[in-house]
């Protein structure tokens, strides 16, 4: 049972406790973007048309939260938000250094071949900066401030990875 599973279970338990009280879960990425996750139970509505009956599923804020979906979705959404912060940071640094042409999709980074070495160095620096922060601690602090009436689980302890090794990793990202 590795650290990734421990962190996933921690995030899921936080989301579960909020969803059970019909509350959304929110956090801020290392770049300052607020993320809000809210999956509601859906209401079903059937509409008759000349071509037949169509079933529409519609989320409704007046309906309760979908506890299961909120619980299961939080870990991948949290990771995606960290990936997005790393992409934001990387592009901002590259633009600062005069680069203007990018081909980015989610966590796939591309530039002209002549700029790949610079992209790799910049990406490693952005990752180092993000993962040197106490991302989970900041997540927990925000939840505790916003939902002081809920007791959340303790933040998992960090492992023994030396984050500075990212800077030396030739094949950190490809």
Image (tube, grey):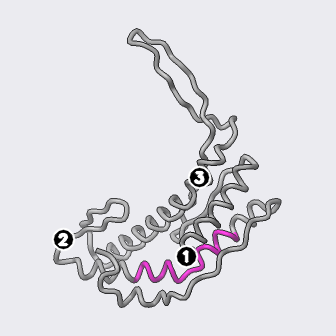
Give the mark toward the camera: 2 or 3.
Answer: 3
| Residue occupying image coordinates x 67% and y 43% | 65
| Residue occupying image coordinates x 49% and y 77% | 130
Q: Residue tagged by mark 1?
A: 2
**Is residue 29 located in the magenta-colored stretch of the structure?**
no
Could you say which is closer to the camera, residue 89 or residue 134?
Answer: 134
Quadrant occupied by the C terminus: bottom left
The residue lying furthest to the top in this view is 50
Could you say which is closer to the camera, residue 30 or residue 134?
Answer: 134
Q: Residue tagged by mark 3?
A: 37
Q: Of helix, strand and loop, which one carries label 2?
A: loop
Give the mark toward the camera: 2 or 1.
Answer: 1
The answer to the question of whether label 1 and label 3 lie on touching residues, with beta carbons closer than 8 A, is no
Quadrant occupied by the N terminus: bottom right
| Residue occupying image coordinates x 39% and y 68% | 87
The residue lying furthest to the front in this view is 1
Number of numbered tags placed on the structure image: 3
Q: How many residues crowd around disc 1 within 10 Å: few (fewer than 14), some, or many (20 or more)?
A: few
Q: Of helix, strand and loop, which one carries label 3?
A: strand
Give the mark toward the camera: 1 or 3.
Answer: 1
Q: How many residues crowd around disc 3 within 10 Å: few (fewer than 14), some, or many (20 or more)?
A: some
Q: Is residue 95 above or below residue 150?
A: below
Q: How many residues crowd around disc 2 within 10 Å: few (fewer than 14), some, or many (20 or more)?
A: few
The picture places residue 72, in percent across and down from the top left corner, at 57, 54
The residue segment tinted magenta is 125-141
- Which mark identifies residue 112? 2
């Amino acid at each position: 049972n590795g650290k990734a599973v421990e962190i996933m279970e921690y995030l899921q338990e936080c989301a579960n406790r909020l969803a059970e009280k019909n509350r959304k879960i929110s956090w801020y990425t290392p770049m300052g973007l607020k993320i809000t996750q809210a999956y509601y139970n859906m209401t079903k509505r059937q509409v008759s048309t000349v071509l037949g009956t169509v079933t529409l599923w519609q989320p409704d804020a007046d309906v309760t939260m979908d506890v299961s979906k909120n619980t299961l979705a939080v870990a991948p959404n949290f990771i995606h938000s960290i990936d997005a912060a790393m992409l934001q940071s990387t592009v901002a640094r590259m633009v600062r250094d005069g680069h203007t042409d990018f081909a980015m999709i989610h966590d796939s980074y591309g530039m002209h071949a002549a700029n790949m070495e610079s992209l790799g160095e910049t990406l490693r620096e952005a990752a180092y900066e993000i993962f040197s922060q106490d991302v989970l601690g900041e997540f927990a602090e925000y939840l505790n401030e916003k939902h002081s009436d809920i007791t959340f689980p303790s933040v998992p302890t960090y492992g023994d990875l030396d984050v500075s090794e990212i800077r030396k990793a030739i094949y950190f990202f490809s």
